[in-house]
Image (cartoon, grey):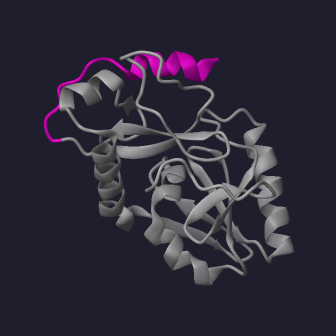
Amino acid sequence: MIVTALVRTYVAPMQVTDLHPLPLLVSARVYRNAGPTEPVLDDFVAGLGVVYSVGPPYGTRLLSLSDLARLAWPRSMLRRKAIETLDRRRDAVRIYGQPPALMLSFDGVESSLLLAGRIWDDLEESVPGDIVVGVPARDVVIVTGSRSPSGLERVYRAVDRMFFAHQRHPLSGRLLIRRGRTWAALGGTTTSASVTY
């Protein structure tokens, strides 16, 4: 698989000084914590995981387990620093379109925004019902509301087209719903994400 080959190039040893990691959503089946050169991977929801990119630019260099050991950071500190980086970059977020479906823009790592709770808190009033998103690829987030039949239809169609078009960084053909502050697969059981952000 092409993504697996790309991962191998991301994990070269690095010098760690003042790091600003950014969380990235990935398909968890592609990544695994099998050895020290593998990326740090935390479970998220619905077959998605979280890895941590070092940048800028973000999205090409992933923090490995051996990098984390050199930093002597517990995972909770890595998560906290990654969310702080995400929060500092909120000004780069752009919202396009009009209801019933919106698209987010965030420098090619749009799916990272699922971990930015404040953004979703702000968007809650913009959609009818609970927030529903499609994340067919790392750089695509389409937003609608659970009480918008036309919005749900648009998001389903867009996700189908994009996910099966063999995107460079495919994520999921499933839609996710945000209830309270927890993401779950739409139509699935409401289980909280394994990692608290």
Name the residue nearer the viewer: 180 or 85. Answer: 180
Q: Is residue 128 magenta?
A: no
Instruction: Please give the name of the residue rendered at 53% of the width and 57% of the height, measured from the top-left corner.
Output: 114
* Residue 151: image location, x then y, percent: 79, 70
Name the residue nearer the viewer: 184 or 19. Answer: 184
- Quadrant (top left, top right, bottom left, bottom right) of the C terminus: bottom left
Quarter-wise, where is residue 185 in the image? Answer: bottom right
* Residue 118: image location, x then y, percent: 44, 71
Instruction: Please give the name of the residue rendered at 56% of the width and 52% of the height, measured from the top-left corner.
Output: 193
The residue range painted magenta reads 1-18
- Whether residue 61 sits left or right of residue 153 in the image: it is left
- Number of marks present in the image shown: 0
* Residue 173: image location, x then y, percent: 75, 44
Q: In this view, does 51 lie above or below 196?
A: above
Q: Does the magenta stretch include residue 6?
A: yes
Instruction: Please give the name of the residue rendered at 62% of the width and 81% of the height, measured from the top-left corner.
Output: 126
* Residue 84: image location, x then y, percent: 30, 57
